Amino acid sequence: MFNITVRDTYEEVSREAAEIMLNVVKGTEKPILGLATGSSPVGLYQEMIRDHKENGTSYKDIITFNLDEYCDIPKDHEQSYWTFMHENLFNELDCPEENIHVPAGNLEDEEQACVDYETELAKYSVDVQVLGIGSDGHIAFNEPGTPFDSLTHLMELTEQTRRDNARFFLDENGDPDMDQVPKFAITQGLASIMRAKKIIMIATGLNKADAVYGMLKGPKTEDCPASILQDHPEVYVFLDNDAASKL
């Protein structure tokens, strides 16, 4: 079931999404948070940090699981998702490092890393999962064609996804460098994501409008991985006017 909110600005979208997140954090004894990277949730994370600093909301008892991680770059690489999460959230909260889970994408046996991550994730019940959506309808790194029953797995990234992410991998002149963009990632599967009790989906910008339409109004098809959310009982969708323009 979708609960759809459309607002004029990214800041408004982020504040309203943060209300759902903070209700879970403050209203659950030991909350399990599913977290995402990318530009979409940054405003939400900024609201969490602001609330922590202004209101003293503690994160010492939370456990977090991130959706995905690039392969073949070190954990401390400037574009790794481990680095992203620490720079944009964890460094500003009182969450113990041992409670933070991010897939390990730089191991020799990445297939085993997928099994290990899914095994650990399955020990918990995620209270709220944050998601963004790719311009082709992917969620996490579940590209079009990913089976709906997929668990944590190794994913070869499509050319479109790599082009979308190339803006973060720059050459010496500051231009996007496709050669630096990883070709594989470890990602939670669609079935893994669907186990979360609540889902927060954030999408802004005209480039997300087609994907948002496919998620909400299109047929449920593996060609649009996000369309699986049509079967979830509690999805909060936060959009700006551009992302909602085709609804």
Image (cartoon, helix red, strand yellow):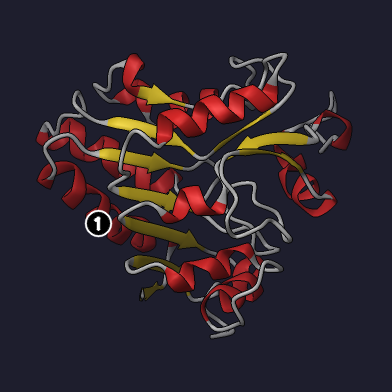
| Residue 11 picture quarter | bottom left
Could you tell me which residue is drawn at 72 percent across and 13 percent down? 108
Q: Position of residue 90 (x, y in %)?
A: 36, 25
Q: Nearer the viewer, residue 26 or 141?
A: 141
User: Where does residue 238 sit, x and y in percent of width and height?
Assistant: 40, 66
Count the numbered circles shown: 1
User: What residue is rendered at 60% in x and 50% in y?
Assistant: 150
Instruction: Determine whether, in the image, residue 117 is placed left or right of residue 161.
Output: left
Mark 1, other Cα within 10 Å: few <14 / some 14–19 / many ≥20: some
Q: Which residue is mark 1?
A: 20
Horizontal placement of 185 versus 91: left or right?
A: right
**Residue 167 in the image: above or below residue 78:** below
Give the residue displayed 11% in from the left and 37% down from the top. Answer: 29
The quarter of the rendered structure image containing the N terminus is bottom left
Under circle 1, the secondary element is helix
| Residue 202, picture quadrant | bottom left
Q: Nearer the viewer, residue 242 or 119?
A: 119
Where is residue 127 shown, x and y percent of the image?
27, 47
- Residue 141 lies, with reference to residue 121, above or below; the image says below
Q: Position of residue 155 (x, y in %)?
A: 72, 41
Above or below: residue 67 compared with residue 158: above
Q: Residue furthest right?
A: 179
Q: Closer to the camera, 188 or 203?
A: 188
Q: Check disc 1 and give the amino acid type.
A: Ile
